[in-house]
Amino acid sequence: MPLIRSSKTMCLLTVLVVALVAPAPAAELRPDTAAAFDRYLRAIETQHADDLRNGHFLIIDRLPEAARGETYARLRQGHIYIEQLHTKEDDRPIPIPGGLVHHWAGVIFMPGVALSQVLAILQDYDNHMNIYKPDVRRSKLLEHNGNEFKVYLQFYRKSIVTVVINANFDVYYTMPGPTRALAQAYSTRIAEVENPDKPNARELPVGNDHGYLWRLDNFWRVEEKDGGTYLQVESVGLTRTVPAILAWLINPLVKNIPRTVLSNLLNATRRAVAGSTGTASSIPSRAARESSASPLTGY
């Protein structure tokens, strides 16, 4: 009997693996899905305005005093703070029919670094393919007018399947004070690349693809204080929903991938800033970060 049950389990796992590795069926970005995401985005922008009025420039400023102090101390030791967010409207969740929102924020601290040095890296868009590889394979500054930028990036991610995305962004920078900067990056076009790196590579129709990424908006906050500069990125993505039969297997990946990408993004920025300034970077090992992780603060 144990052998029979084991065989059945292996068969089930084989079926699931085949289902996951095989190309996902086409999915269409419905108008009500896009409208719901825009509604979610407006709620985020309202939250941002409230935060600024309440003196909460970084997301960790929302934490209770004791947790906030501990978190700032850990950041100055080189740790990364990462938190999954769920923005509400009038204290109620915002439903996204036909789609999933992936909303995460992360913060790092770079000692001995000025705000201007961080902005120089963030705005070096032609070089993002080198700074953020392998997650970014191509990058190009398309237009630049004052504090406004139009940017092209090609994203690459290999997990269960290989996904390549061409994305265009409008980016807006503002300086709410001499030691603070904000950047809002809104995706204006996202197209999945079918058969990447092959002679028959082509873009699938926008919004009518596999649904791996339909929208991506990033909000950056940079603050110089405590003898260095804090960098925060808040990422909000929209993808298709996960089939219910596979949710138990896919959901952990859905949660892990944004966290990993965010961690890579912040660490790559820190390394690039350190390389451009000659500043020593204090980054503890992954094992050290995980051994001292605190679910309460999102580490």
Image (cartoon, rainbow, N blue to C red):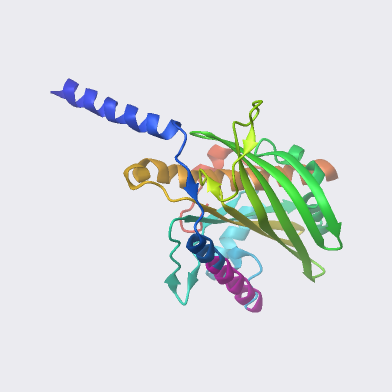
The location of residue 201, given as percent across then percent down, is: 64, 32
Q: Residue at x 55, y 71 (%)?
A: 43
Left or right position of 155 against 238 = right
Give the magenta-colored segment's residue range.
Answer: 39-53
Instruction: Judge whether residue 94 can be spotted in this image.
Output: yes
Q: Looking at the image, which is closer to me, 185 or 57? A: 185
**Type of secondary structure dominating the magenta stretch:** helix
Quadrant for residue 169, please give it.
bottom right
Picture layout, residue 46 above or below residue 78:
below
Left or right position of 155 against 147 = left
The location of residue 157, given as percent across then percent down, is: 59, 37
Left or right position of 250 against 127 = left
The location of residue 199, given as percent across then percent down, is: 66, 25
> If the image is split into quadrants, where does the N terminus sit?
top left
Left or right position of 90 against 246 = right
Quadrant for residue 175, please give it.
bottom right
Instruction: Judge whether residue 278 can be spotted in this image.
Output: no
Picture layout, residue 15 above or below residue 40:
above
Q: Residue at x 59, y 46 (%)?
A: 205
